[in-house]
Structure formats: C-alpha cells, structure tokens
Image (tube, rainbow, N blue to C red):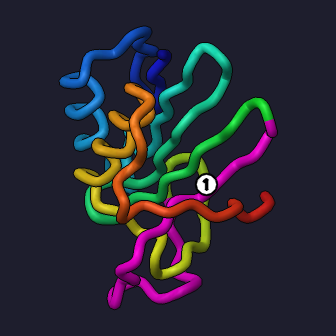
Amino acid sequence: MKFEGQNFAVVNAPSDRVLESRLLALKSYGRHSYASLTDAQGNYVQVAGGGVTCMVESFDASTSTRLRAFHDKPSPVFPDGTVLSFGGNEMRLKSDEWFHASSVVEIFLCFKYGRHYPETVNWRPAPQK
C-alpha cells in the first residue's frame, strides 16, 4: 500500500496510526487537503477536504471505474450542488456525499485490510471530470 497526499511525503505500508493522524489533519483549505491510498494492483481510495467536509472516491483498476461514496443521511447544511473547494480542485457534491473525517479513517482502514465498507457507506458512479 502507498499512502500519499498534498504536501506530505509518500508512505509505503503506512501504519493505522499514520493513516488516522494524517487523515484527521486534512483541511478543506491550506497545505493538506487531499490524500489517497493505493494498493499493488492500482486500486485506490481517495479523500478531498477535511474535518466535516470530506468527499471520498474509490477506483477499481481492473474496470477503470471511479465511484463516489454516499450515505443515507443527507446533510441539512450542504444541499445538493454545494461546492467543496480544496487544494486540488473544486467539486459540486450532493447532500449525501459529505463525510466526517472519522468516517474517512474507517473507509481507508477497510480498504487497507480488504474488509467490507461500513453498511452506512454506499457507492455510485463518480461524475465525469
């Protein structure tokens, strides 16, 4: 596994502690606003934003499919079309695509260990760029 992100050194075979500390330190603004974890086959999970304003996507290398995570509790604060601005880009999200950083840590750990994602996390095709 390779863990990389905006303005921090690549970490091969990151410990759970490193994943957690770096993911929880992400912000939608500033020097550290996105990160990804990639396996040996080229599959990955990535996050943009930080704190209570995180967006998560996954990529399946065998099918070249990129998916966006969503959950069953739409945000009353961020309606459909709200823009997530982060160091790498700006993206419009749906109200059910906003995640808290603690949920992102759980998603990354599931990916790292090949476990099923939490039942509250669902996936849909990611919008085309």
What's the residue type where badge 1 is placed? Answer: Asn
Q: Secondary structure at mark 1?
A: strand
Q: Please, which residue is most extreme toward the top here?
A: 12
In the image, is 106 to the left or to the right of 38? Answer: left
Would residue 64 be visible to someone looking at this image? yes
Q: How many marks?
A: 1
The magenta span reads 63-85
Instruction: Determine the residue positioned at 59% across, 45% down.
Output: 58
- Where in the figure is residue 109, as x and y percent of width and height? 33, 34
Residue 129 placed where, x, y %? Answer: 78, 58
Q: Is residue 67 above or below residue 108?
A: below
Q: Residue at x 51, y 41 (%)?
A: 46
Q: Quadrant of residue 112?
A: top left
The residue positioned 41% from the left and 54% from the top of the image is 49
Residue 95 in the magenta stretch? The answer is: no
* Residue at the (19%, 24%) spot, across then down: 17
Q: Nearer the viewer, residue 70 or 93?
A: 70
On the image, the x and y values in percent for residue 10 come to 45, 15
Q: Position of residue 16 (x, y in %)?
A: 24, 24
Q: Is residue 6 visible?
A: no
**Picture layout, residue 39 above or below residue 87:** above
78 or 41: nearer the viewer: 41
Is residue 78 placed above or below 125 in the rendered structure? below
Within 10 Å of disc 1 (Cα), the crowding (few <14, some 14-19, many 20+) is few
Q: Is residue 68 magenta?
A: yes
Left or right side of 124 for 84:
left
Disc 1: which residue: 89
